[in-house]
Amino acid sequence: MTRTLVDVGPAAVGAVIFVLLAAWCFSHRRVDQSLAALGLYLGLLDGYLKLSAGSPFITLARDVLVVAIAGGALLRAMNSHKPLPLPPLGGLVLAFSAVVLVELFNPGAPGLGTGAAGVRQHLEFVPLFFLGYAFMRRGTQIHKLLMVLLVCAAAGGIASYIQSTLTPEEFAKWGPGYSERILGTGAFEGAPRVAVDEAGETSIRPFGLGSDLGAGAIAAALALPALIAMMLSARGGVRIVLIPLAIGIGLAVATSGTRAALVTVFVSLVAFGLIAAVSRNALRIVAGLTIGTILVYGAFEYLGPSNTTARRAQSIAPSRALTTFSQERGSSVTRFGDYAASYPLGLGVGTVGPAAAALSNRPQATRTLNQETQWNFLILELGIVGLACFVAINLRLMTLALTRIRRITDHALRLQLAALAAPLFGLFIQGFAGPTTVTVPAAPYFWFVAGVLSYWVVRRTVRETPFDAALAPTSGEHRSARTSQPLNGERQPLLRSSSVGAE
C-alpha cells in the first residue's frame, strides 16, 4: 500500500500543479505572461511527458492550456460589451477553420469520434493566431518571446546531445513512448527511430525534448534566427546569457539526425538574411550569419566526423541534394497530382495523420495513402479548398515579411521581427518532407507568429479599434503607462490592448 502511494504521489502532485496552472492561465490578465508559460510548457515538457508516460492523451494538457488562455481573454472581451472585428488575415484563418469543420461531415470521413480527433489535429493551435495578434503589441514582448524560443531550443539541444551519447537500449529506458519508437515496437513496428551505418551499427537519432526524431533541431531552426537577432540587438548582460543558449542551440542542430531538420535550419537562416537585407540591416546580418555559421560548424567539429548528423548531411550537399530528395520524397511529391485529381473535396478529417494512426481498426485503404508531405496530408484531409486557404496564409505572410518589416525604423525591433518571420520560410519548405501543422513546435509557432506578424506588419494605424478596446484591462490596471514601444521608430500613444502585457 505504501509503495502504491509513493508511485501515485508524483503524478498526483503533477496533476494538482497543472490544474493550478490552467486556472492561472484562465484568470490572469497579463495574457502575454500566460502565453510565455504555454510556450515553456510546449518547448520543455509536452513531448517528454507524452513519451515518458507512453500515453498520447498527455497531449490534451496543452489543449487545456490553450483553451484556458483563449477562454479567459474572450470572457473578458465579452464582458466589455464591445464588438470584435476580425484581425488582418483573420478571414483566411476562419476560412481554413470552416473547411476543417465541413470536412468532419465528408462522406469519406471515418466518423464523428475519429473526426473530432481530426479536427483537433488541424485546429488545436489556431486560437494562438488571435492571441498573438491581440496581446503581442510591444517591442519588449517580442524580446521576451524570442528569449522563450532560445531557452526551449537550448534545453532541447542539451537533451539531444545527451541522447546522442546513449545506446538504443539505454534511450529506450526513458519511458514506454521512447521504447516504442527506438526499438520499433507497437505502432512503430518495423520502423525504429534509429540510424544504421554501413557496418550495420545502430545509433540514436535524438528527439530532444520533442516527441519524435529531429524535434530538437526544428526548435533550433525556429530559434537560430532569434539568436542572431538578439546577439546583434541585445545589450549588456543579455549577451552573456546568450552564450550558453547558443551552445545548446548549436548542439541541437549538430545532433538532429535528420536531413529535413538541417534543410529547415538552412532555409530559415537564408530567409532571415533576405528579410534583414531588404530591411536595411545588410552589414549587421552578414556579421550575424557568420556568427551563426561558426556556431553550427563548431558544434559539428566538437562532435567529430562519426556524428550521425554529419554523415547524413553529406547526402544533402549541393551536388547531391536533388538526387537525395528525389530518392527520399520524389514518389510522395508525384502522388500529389493524383490525389488532387482523385480527391478534390478531400476524404474528411481523421483520414490520415496522427488521428488516423491512433486507430487500431483503421481502414486498409487509408493505410496505403501517402501522407509524407504537408501538401499530400492537406489534400487528403481537406481537399483543394483547404489546401488553398493554408497556402494563401503562408504566401501572404512571407510576402508581407519581405515587404513590410523594412518599414519599421527601430533597427532592434526590425531584426527581431525578421527573426520571427524567417522560420516560416523554413517550415514551408519542410512541408515537402512531412506534415508541419500537426507537430510541435512547428504548428504552435506557425499560428502564433502568424498572429503576431498580422499586427506588426499589416495593421498600420495605432488608433484604438473596437477589437483593442474589447480586450483592454479593467479596474484601471497599468494606468501609469502612457507610451508604448515605437511601431515605426516614434513614440506612440499606448494601445489599450497592449497594456495587458505592459511592463
Image (cartoon, helix red, strand yellow):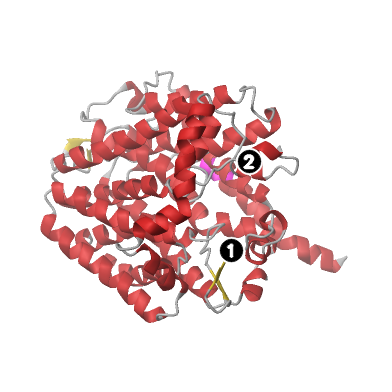
Instruction: Determine which residue is flagged by label 2.
Output: 355
Q: Are marks 1 and 2 in contact (CB under 8 Å)?
A: no
Residue at 59% across, 31% down: 349
- Residues 93 and 143: in front is 93
Earlier in the chain: of badge 1 and badge 2, it is 1
- Inspect the image, locate mark 1, and give the three-letter code of the amino acid beneath it: Arg
Residue at 32% across, 76% down: 298
Please say if 108 is above or below 421.
above
- Inspect the image, locate mark 2, and give the three-letter code of the amino acid beneath it: Ala
Label 1 – label 2 distance at C-alpha: 20 Å
Using the rendered view, name the quadrant where residue 228 is placed.
Answer: bottom left
Q: Position of residue 301 (x, y in %)?
A: 35, 79
Q: Position of residue 200 (x, y in %)?
A: 58, 76
Look at the image and tell me whether residue 323 can be seen. yes
| Relative side of 240 to 54, left or right | left
Q: Which residues are magenta?
A: 22-26
Q: Considering the image in quadrants, where does the N terminus appear?
A: bottom right
Helix, strand or loop under label 2: helix
Q: Position of residue 346 (x, y in %)?
A: 54, 28
Instruction: Determine which residue is flagged by label 1.
Output: 193
